[in-house]
Amino acid sequence: MTPPLIIANWKSYKTEKEAKLWLTIFKEHRELLLSKTVMLLAPYTCLSSLKKEIDALGLPIVLGAQDISPFSEGAYTGEINALQIREFASYVLIGHSERRRLLLESDELISKKVAMAKKEGLEVLLCVQDIETPIPEGVTMVAYEPVSAIGTGHPDTPENAASVITKIKQKGISYGIYGGSVTAENVRSFTEHVSDGVLVGSASLDPRNFLAIINHA
Ligand code: PGA
């Protein structure tokens, strides 16, 4: 059995200094990290120094970005493109519901981002809210995150999550991840039979909470 993917999504939290501090705790828990596949989706501003620290400490943590420009390099003020991300990270999260809702990202924009990421060799983790959300071509890893479960303390039931993830995987998706109010207490109910891993927001910010999730997954 492949170990579950445990993914931290820091969202717009943590300065570079705080990010480095978070990482130091993992030095003593290398064995635990090796028992799962651990990924960290960090803000752009932390990626460079996190990569240096992870490499220097030899930690088995995969780095990813939380978004990507739909454009290649060029005159696109404020955008961070695939090549810039690829210097530091191998994954990118695309289509999180917070971006769909607050920044009005459309399915069309999201599929442009996916195409750009794939073109430059980045692995994509696409967020969908339900079974109806379109999945662009080339995506193999999907996180099902019902909006009602994000940051609310009210996760989906494992039964419903299992049913949605099964349908998503029937579309040719290799990895079906669950996200929304995952904690150390409930993580097992999702990783045991329901999903190939979990996407963790709030509970990933405190390194001890995140370690407990890795431990219990
Ligand atoms: P949450 O966030 O764990 O705080 O619910 C999950 C996410 O938005 O990815």
Image (cartoon, rainbow, N blue to C red):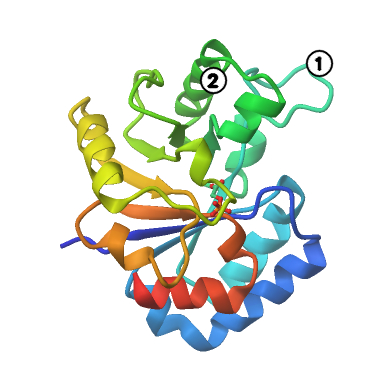
Residue 203's place in the image compared with 76, above or below, is below
Give me the residue at 60% from left, 74% from top: 207
Task: Name the residue nearer the viewer: 163 or 139.
Answer: 163
Q: What element carries label 2?
A: helix
Location of residue 101 by image quarter:
top right
Mark 2 C-beta to ligand 1 under 8 Å? no
**Res 55 label:** none
Q: Is residue 163 above or below residue 73?
A: below
Question: How many numbered callouts?
Answer: 2
For the residues labelled 2 and 1, the Cα–Cα distance comes to 20 Å
Q: Position of residue 208 (x, y in %)?
A: 57, 79
Using the image as rendered, state which of residue 159 and residue 42 is in the foreground: 159
Image height check: is 187 above or below 122?
Answer: below
Where residue 96 sits: x, y (%)? 56, 34
Q: Looking at this view, is 190 or 116 the one in front?
A: 190
Q: Which residue is drawn at 58% across and 51% down?
A: 152
- Within 10 Å of the Cα at label 2, are there few (<14), some (14-19), or many (20+) other Cα atoms? many
Q: Is mark 1 within 8 Å of ligand 1?
A: no
The amino acid type of the residue labelled 2 equals Ile
Residue lying furthest right:
77
- Judged from this view, the residue extending furthest toward the bottom is 28
> For the residue marked with disc 1, what is the amino acid?
Ala
Residue identified by numbered label 1: 75
Rendered image quadrant of residue 67? top right
Relative to residue 99, is residue 135 drawn left or right? left
Residue where numbered disc 2 is placed: 110
Can residue 184 be seen from the camera position used here? yes
Foreground mark, 2 or 1, reads 2
Q: In which quarter of the image is the N terminus?
A: bottom left
Mark closest to the chain's N terminus, 2 or 1: 1
> Looking at the picture, how far across and down is residue 39, in whole percent?
48, 58
